[in-house]
Image (tube, grey):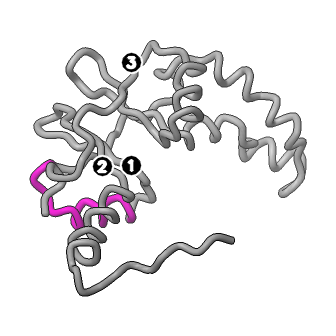
Amino acid sequence: MQVKEIMTNAPRTVTPDTDLLEVVSLMCLYRYSGLPVMDGEKMVGFIAEKDVFHRLFPTLEDMMADGLGAGDYSGMMGKYKDVVNLKVADLMATDVITVSPEQHILQAATTMVRHKFRRIPVAEAGVLKGMLSLGDVHKAIFQANIASNNSVKPPVAVGM
């Protein structure tokens, strides 16, 4: 099974000059862990939740000054308001790893797991074609092996 068979074909995207507040709102409302950053038709980066949170963490210099493990974590949380006033270009990753629409889904999943990604852009010759999540891969494997096999019934969820 190929990536193009299970990927999201029209993913939400942002631009480098998008306000980060808009991006984090999308992340919180729609549970996006990351979004491709586009300049016209060209993908120029990727903005992920981890990029936002890294701006809240103490620097190595801060940790050395305050003592390792020590820090004003409540104060660091307060920096969030400053972070969301930035633009996507200020935090986005520009060395974007992608998978091909023609790749086998397990090959793409291997790339995702090795890089600790939950979602990855699908691109061909630098052109964004879609997005793939580990959930997409898992669902496809489940459907191919369990749901389509009438002799094997998935367990019934029991209320708690």
Which residue was labeled with disc 1?
119
The residue that appears at 43% across and 54% down in the rendered structure is: 118
Quadrant in the picture for the N terminus: bottom left
* Spatial CA span between label 3 and label 1: 18 Å
Q: Where is residue 158 in the image (x, y as percent from the top left)?
A: 58, 75
Which residue lies under the disc numbered 3? 15
Residue found at x 55% / y 40%: 49
Q: Residues within 10 Å of mark 3 (few under 14, many from 20)?
A: many
**Type of amino acid at the residue the image marks with label 1:** Arg
Q: Is residue 31 above or below residue 90?
A: below
The reply to whether the C-beta atoms of the residues labelled 3 and 2 are less than 8 Å apart is no
Q: Distance between the residues labelled 3 and 2?
A: 20 Å
Is 56 or 142 nearer to us in this picture?
A: 142
Q: What residue type is labelled 3?
A: Thr
> Is 157 left or right of 10, judged from the image as shown?
right
Where residue 20 appears, as percent x and y from the top left, is 56, 21
x and y percent of residue 58 in the render? 75, 42
Discs 3/2, front:
2
| Stretch in magenta | 101-113
Query: Alpha-carbon neighbours of circle 1 within 10 Å: few (<14), some, or many (≥20)?
Result: many
On residue 132, which mark appears?
2
The vertical placement of 67 against 38, above or below, is below
